Image (tube, coloured by chain):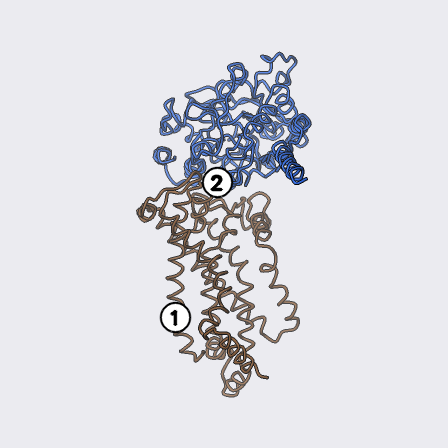
Amino acid sequence: MKHIKTLTVAAALMGASALSAQAQELHFIMCGGEVRPADQKVIDDFIAAHAGVTVNMEAVEWGTCQDKSMQLAAAGDPPSIAYMGSRTLRQLAKNDLIVPVTFTAEEEANFQPGVLSTVSSGGQYWGIPHAFSTKALYMNCAVIEAAGAECKAPATWEELVALAKTVTDNTDAAGIGIAGKDFDNTMHMFLDFLYSNDGVVFDAEGKPALDSANTRETLQLYADLLPYMESGPTEWERDQMKDLFNDGQIAMYVTGPWGKGQHAEKVPTQLIAPIPHGPSGDSGSILITDSIAVFKGSGHEELAIELAKALTSGAAQYDLDSSWGLTPILDYEKLGMTDVYYKADPWPIFVANIKSGGPEPMVEDFKSLQAVFTNMVQGIMLGEGSVDELVTAAGEELAAVR
Amino acid sequence: MTDATVQQDHVTKATRRGLSEPVFAWALIAPALVFIGFIVAWPLLETIRLSFTDATLGGESYIGLKNYVDLFNSDKFYDIVGRTFYWMFLSVTLKLVMGLIGACLLNAAIPGKALFRILIMPPWVIPIAIGVIGWKWMYNGYFGLISGLLQEFGILDERIALLSTKTSAFYSAIVTDVWVGTPMVTLFFLAAMQGVSRDLYEAAWVDGAGRWYRFRRITIPQIMPVIVSMALLSAIWTFNSFEIIWILTEGGPRGATTTLIIDTYKVAISSQRFGEGAARAVVIVVLLALFSLAYLYFLNRVNRHYGAK
């Protein structure tokens, strides 16, 4: 009898431990404040296909999300998986908080050019790109025509400045909205113009290369546009400018493909055009991705990678890109899809500048990198130095960024 | 049985159980000491330890005084310290002056003063973040009340974005800080004024003293200990004021509103350089400790001068 009792207890313990091995909960931090329907569908299918696996979704606003994920990891309680800006990957990788990701040659070939460079560091990939954006110039034709000008896309910076001047001189609106706040998209917008002038932040060997003639020309563009910008540009970040644009307070600004939907109701006569190019380059854009990263130490890294791969597989990714208005992250035609959404206007503009675009620079201390650009841009907006002085200072500051 | 007798009885019982009086006293305050040690001393010691490391997300190693050497060799650091003290001095002075004026008005025999006492409370009562977001909206050049009114009344021809230039952003942040901090100062001064004996005023009035004279020679001296105490508390709070600046400007533009606490947050939390951030935090503690010691010395002298205990 005693042996039977012992065996029963042992069997119960073994059964419980087997169950606990099977019952796994993935903690998924989703930056952006919401779980998009296309992602939720994949997650639901994943849970259905894996008995005993649950996914605890935590949607967190962008403002605090990335810091939260990093601090949880640093405190030894990492999320299993997180969707976050690719710019954070290098810092996480350097501190041994996330696991590297591998792609087959076929998977690599399916990504749009430049996309994988946004997640690579030290010869490895550290996340799976899951959202991609390029930028274009949005024009409020009603405002531009009220200024007596033709609503025609400016091709060069000279034409851009001239059009901005015409609007400012002849209407109550500002010619252009430029981001100048202490915020990441102040850097992003500057890079949109820098990459449209063949500029770089780091050279091919990864050395700082911001102190260049291309950067000087770009900052000079900001100086030339200054009289025609919105009032108090250091107070504005790009996402707030849609309100000024919709309100007819600015005639033009640069934003991503989501802008069309944001303006459609109030600015039915919007024109979307490639970002005008500078004297030294062709129209380009910053290539920004958000990625799915798998954290170390959760105890179920392989399962998390499996979920990440499911979320970013061809069909699931297409659903997300097309439903959410994102620049296509994969070349879906290579995957055999026809009649893809990005063949229709205005998508060719956003797709065309993928090849000429440049990456969001990957550094360990992203906030310091951001400060290099905001200091430079705000310096010209506040009249605190010449173009030459400010670019030289920015080059020195960049050299000190880890 | 009086309180003293009860206390004596407890001490006697403790002594009977083999506890000496000092041990019994320490046993009584031990829980409080443990609590304070846990929430104050341990974090402080940990911060000091971190300041001698290069702690980041991935780990830390001992680097001696490097964080402090880098900090004290940086011109930017001295700019920030100077700005922080200027911010504190200006803001506290305005709070004290406005608080004094407000308290005098509320202390005057005017009809409906109870209503005015309630009306002064909102800046202190509503959550700071909500109030500051309201101010941020008012300062906006396009949608803000201030710019709109100034244009409406013909004072300005063009929009004014008060948070967009260095000078206007700094003084706008001061105005908001004063708005948040003045009600409390006012209420403390008011309470002190109400404690001043009426006899003093009546005697002075009989002797022919005017209002201004009575204010200078009776009110101010009588409430001086409260003024000094409030100045010290307000100075510490203003020195460490974070949310007002962060919500309005995040320390910008171009660092114009970056005080020591904002700089510390940016380095330690935004850039995840915990070691460097800890060094800044230690500097703040030292500066505030020195400032407080000087103030307490001054407070003692004031109290002695005015006969307060």
Q: Nearer the viewer, mark 2 or mark 1?
A: 2
| Same chain shared by disc 2 and disc 1 | no
Q: Is residue A181 visible?
A: yes
A281 relative to B248 in the view: left or right: left
Which chain does tag 2 point to? A
Q: Under tag 2, what secondary structure? A: helix
Q: Residue at x 59, y 74 (%)?
A: B108
User: Which residue has dot 1 on it?
Assistant: B298
Which chain does tag 1 point to? B
Label placed on residue A74: 2
Q: Nearer the viewer, residue A271 or B240?
A: B240
Relative image position of residue A97 (x, y in whole percent): 47, 34
Q: Which chain is blue?
A: A
Q: Residue at x 38, y 29 (%)?
A: A210
Q: Are marks 2 and 1 in contact (CB under 8 Å)?
A: no
Quarter of the image for residue A53 reads top right
| Crowd around label 1: few <14 · some 14–19 · many ≥20 (10 Å) | few
Q: Is residue A55 visible?
A: no
At label 2, which amino acid type do we have?
A: Ala
Relative image position of residue B175 (x, y in whole percent): 51, 56
Q: Which chain is brown?
A: B
Q: Quadrant of the C terminus of chain B?
A: bottom left
Relative image position of residue B199 (x, y in whole percent): 54, 85
Compared to residue A356, the image places residue B70 above or below, namely below
Q: Nearer the viewer, residue B153 or B187?
A: B187
